[in-house]
């Protein structure tokens, strides 16, 4: 599936059937994780097949206000550091594996566990527990009852997240169309983010797309937003590939008051 269609259709799933993912499918996910570990270095994935252990241990502790998501399996990524660039990498890498799992036909949801005490994390996951900040719940979503309304998380309109030349000049649809950027930037809005904060802002400046993060007053929230920024960086690169643009984001990480300038992508 084209990444643009994929993004517009994807959504987090929080109600899972107890039947999990077939063993051979879990093996496929594991193989993919191993390939990514080799490619990136210094990272380690963990897949917990028996999700019940995790559910019980993290109940009341993980997720939004302690609302743990019960799933048959969980995946986590262990990275020891938590500097800004590492937080970007966490979002980028986890979302890469997440898209692969969803493309295989399974449902997922990110779970934030950065505030779960280290002892609990080590008890559940072993040594790697101390370096896990997020989990991905994996399984098959329960079917919706026919009278249930499909809940979609609202996204900012394009002119509140995309600008021309600087952050005070919202773009027009015509301009985006002229620049051939409408499809990518329209679709990228559907990327997942912590508490659906959508902290990403894009400034089109000449042949570059410059990426900014809207800062919060809390440092720990900014760390979390950096993970969301890593997520959109991954999607942007993947969507650019469908235009035969194989560039990568050039990270700069410059503080600009209300915003953190993350980097630029040359189209
Ligand atoms: C880094 C990150 C952390 C998240 N943490 C949680 C979480 O702890 N609990 C939860 O229910 N959803 C979590 N989510 C899912 C977001 O709430 C969800 O992506 C957002 O509300 C948009 O909804 P959608 O994914 O259905 O489009 C997280 C998403 C990201 C990217």
Image (cartoon, rainbow, N blue to C red):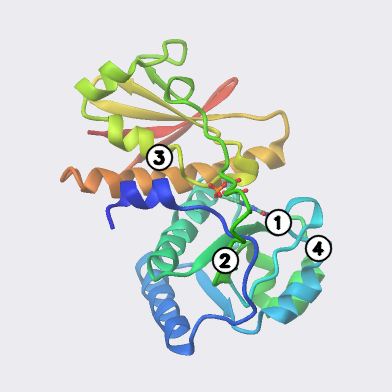
Q: Seen in the image, is 114 located left or right of residue 66?
A: left
Q: Is residue 235 above or below residue 145?
A: above
Q: Earlier in the sequence, mark 3 or mark 1?
A: 1
**Quarter of the rendering occupied by the N terminus:** bottom left
In front here: 155 or 51? 155
Q: Secondary structure at mark 3?
A: helix
Q: Say which residue label 1 marks.
A: 114
Residue 26's label in the rendered image is: none
Residue 143's label in the rendered image is: 2
Foreground label between 4 and 3:
3
| Residue 143 screen position, x and y as percent | 57, 66
Q: Seen in the image, is 134 located left or right of residue 186?
A: right
Foreground label between 2 and 4:
2
Q: Do residues under tags 4 and 1 come within 8 Å of each other at their CB atoms?
A: no
| Residue 24 screen position, x and y as percent | 43, 88
Q: Do residues under tags 4 and 3 come within 8 Å of each other at their CB atoms?
A: no
Q: Earlier in the sequence, mark 4 or mark 3?
A: 4
Q: Is mark 2 within 8 Å of ligand 1?
A: no
Q: Residue at x 22, y 33 (%)?
A: 267
User: How many marks on residues?
Assistant: 4
Q: Earlier in the sequence, mark 1 or mark 2?
A: 1
Q: CA distance from mark 4 to mark 1?
A: 8 Å
| Residue 238 screen position, x and y as percent | 30, 50
Residue 117's label in the rendered image is: 4
In front here: 143 or 228? 143
Residue 133 location, quadrant: bottom right
Q: Earlier in the sequence, mark 3 or mark 2?
A: 2
Q: Say which residue label 3 marks.
A: 188
Near mark 1 (Cα within 10 A), the count class, few <14, some 14-19 or many ≥20, is some
Near mark 4 (Cα within 10 A), the count class, few <14, some 14-19 or many ≥20, is some
């Amino acid at each position: 599936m084209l990444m643009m269609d994929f993004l517009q259709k994807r959504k987090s799933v929080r109600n899972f059937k107890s039947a999990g993912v077939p063993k051979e499918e879990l093996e496929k996910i594991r193989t993919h994780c191993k390939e990514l570990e080799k490619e990136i270095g210094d990272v380690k994935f963990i897949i917990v097949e028996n999700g019940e252990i995790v559910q019980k241990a993290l109940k009341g502790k993980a997720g939004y206000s302690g609302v743990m998501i019960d799933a048959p399996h969980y995946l986590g990524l262990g990275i020891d550091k938590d500097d800004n660039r590492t937080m970007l990498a966490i979002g980028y890498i986890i979302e890469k594996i997440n898209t692969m799992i969803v493309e295989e036909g399974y449902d997922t949801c990110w779970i934030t566990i950065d505030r779960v005490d280290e002892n609990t994390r080590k008890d559940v996951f072993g040594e790697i527990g101390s370096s896990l900040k997020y989990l991905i719940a994996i399984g098959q979503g329960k079917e919706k009852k026919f009278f249930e309304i499909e809940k979609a998380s609202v996204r900012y309109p394009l002119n509140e997240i995309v600008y021309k030349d600087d952050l005070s000049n919202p773009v027009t649809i015509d301009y985006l169309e002229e620049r051939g950027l409408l499809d990518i930037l329209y679709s990228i809005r559907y990327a997942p983010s912590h508490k659906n904060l959508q902290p990403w802002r894009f400034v089109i400046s000449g042949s570059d797309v410059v990426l900014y993060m809207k800062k919060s007053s809390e440092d720990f929230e900014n760390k979390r937003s950096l993970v969301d920024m890593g997520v959109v960086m991954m999607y942007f690169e993947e969507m650019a590939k469908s235009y035969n643009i194989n560039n990568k984001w050039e990270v700069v990480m410059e503080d600009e008051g209300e915003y953190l300038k993350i980097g630029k992508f040359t189209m």
